[in-house]
Image (cartoon, rainbow, N blue to C red):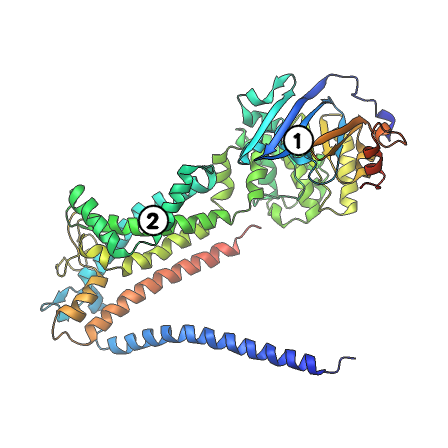
Amino acid sequence: MFTETAISKQKRWTENVMRIFFLVMTSLMILPLLLIIGYLIYKALPVLSLEFLFTNPKDNMRAGGLWAPFLGTIYLVVVSLLVSAPIGVFAAVYLNEYARESWFTRITNLAVVNLAGVPSIVHALFGVGAFVLFAGLGESILAASLTLAIMTLPVIIASTTEALKAVPMSFREACWNLGATRWQTIRRIVIPNSISGILTGVILQVSRAAGETAPIMFTGAVFYKAIAEGNLFAYNVMEQCMALSLHLFTISTQVPDVTEGIPYGTAVVLVGSVLLVNAAAIVLRVYLRTRKKW
Amino acid sequence: MNSNSQNGSQTTPIIEVTDLKVHYGNTPALNGVSFDVYQNEILGIIGPAQSGKTTLLKVINRTLEFTPDTTVAGSVKLDGEDISTIGDVYGLRRRIGMVQPLPVGLPLSIYDNVAFAPRTAGIRAKSELDEIVERCLQQAALWEEVKDRLNTLGTKLSGGQQQRLTIARALSHQPDILCLDEFSIAVDPVTTMRIEEVLKTLRTEMTILLVTNLVQQAKRLANRTAFFLNGDLIEIDTTDIIFSENPSEQATYDYVNGTFG
């Protein structure tokens, strides 16, 4: 009764072929990532050390470490997220929880989608016009961070909206039936149950803000600037700063005779810190998911 | 069981619905229905899907306002006051307990589920909340099963327990009217019977609107029964008459006896 027929044999064969096909595709996806990271670390090994991270570049950037660009990138990322995270999250809460379908929400949603598709160099030009010149901030950490904030805002709105939509509508209806206002519903039910998704979306924007070169190039990042080593408050937000992404571009293309390890070391630090932050996001997400309440 | 079916039918109406019309966009959901609900009766509301039963409940506690693009005409009065002009809509909703078809345990502890409405209404005292939680869980016949684990998640209860939790929550704001929308749809027959027993006790304290797709449930519990069809109120009368051999409308007889359509 259960002996293998020609048809079931063929089914089993197809099943195996398809599984292997998908496995190969997955491996092809992972392979470049591993090769890139492996190659970078291999090339960077001669220069990698704690001292590399905590000293300023020296000798016209042909020697020394990464302190100024590393701290600059941290400033840019933190200031930009301090601006874009609250605005983005609260805007998404409004659009998802309060707003009724109207021309205003339709235009806003359209703007969000289109803003997310604008190339970063266009954001850079907007930043020069709006923040550096019009607002009179000059080329500064603040102007560059605001430009990065404009760039990350639509994605934060989109990811927050996703997180809010994942909370079932029936929870909201149950709260309304109990005489709760929209705000009470949001505060007691919606936000506590979407906070993991919201935070993950925000944290993932760290990597975008840290990696971009174009938006900061004309708004606040400089080729070279020495700062006090080991002082976390060495930058003023109204001054310019160095940044890892721009520094990597400079030493790979603009400065001759750089020690080979230094650009690779810069890349490792940039990719490494981004991976570290993303890993933190994943850990946070896993932790909050174990506390999932339905 | 229908010995007291005349209960309430002579007393004052608590809800007066007059020529109520509801549209979703251009689609009509209720086409001008008028009826009264009397104090301390169980009004059974029966009818096939898409007949406007759920819409009716949403109009009464004004949660239809959360659905975009709806228009409501006609009037619904609660204790003689038109609900559309009531200032404190949240107070209105707390006068009406609502139980939805699928059990919805909020992602909070059992205790917090029941304490949710009292807290949003401003009650903070622990002793008062404790007392409300115990009373409501007792009333919903759930207390004995959960009294030792009030801090576990309400969403982790079984479907039948969650539906009783929903009823306890609906009672937590001491409503005058309890609306149940096909509460037994996701509940096993034993739990259904337990909840029906609960409703029989509750009718002494409040008015109950029982929307049900089980006509026998209306027959078991309701003092009066209303039959809705495609947004029209076909007939409303005492349950004895609706389920007799000769209700006023042939459609009622056909639906009640399962020979509909």
Q: Is residue B210 above or below residue A113?
A: above
Q: Residue furthest front?
A: B26
Same chain under badges 2 and 1? The reply is no
Question: Mark 2 — on which chain does it sit?
Answer: A
Horizontally, residue B64 falls left or right of residue B44, namely left
- Residue B68 image position (x, y, % from top left): 53, 36
Q: Is residue A56 above or below residue B202?
A: below
- Residue A113 image position (x, y, % from top left): 38, 50
Q: Nearer the viewer, residue A31 or B150?
A: A31
Q: Quadrant of residue A92?
A: top left
Classify mark 1: helix, strand or loop: strand
Q: How many marks?
A: 2
Q: Is residue A30 visible?
A: yes
Q: Is residue A49 visible?
A: no
Q: Residue at x 23, y 68 (%)?
A: A266
Q: Quadrant of residue A120?
A: bottom left
- Residue B145 image position (x, y, % from top left): 71, 45
Which disc is residue B199 wearing? none
Which residue type carries mark 1?
A: Leu
Q: Nearer the viewer, residue B115 or A141?
A: A141
Q: Residue at x 30, y 52 (%)?
A: A151
Question: Mark 1 — on which chain does it sit?
Answer: B
Q: Residue at x 83, y 25 (%)?
A: B5
What residue is shown with label 1? B30
- Residue A52 image position (x, y, % from top left): 20, 69
Q: Residue furthest right?
A: B245
Q: Distance between the Cα atoms at labels 2 and 1?
A: 44 Å
Which disc is residue A153 wearing? 2
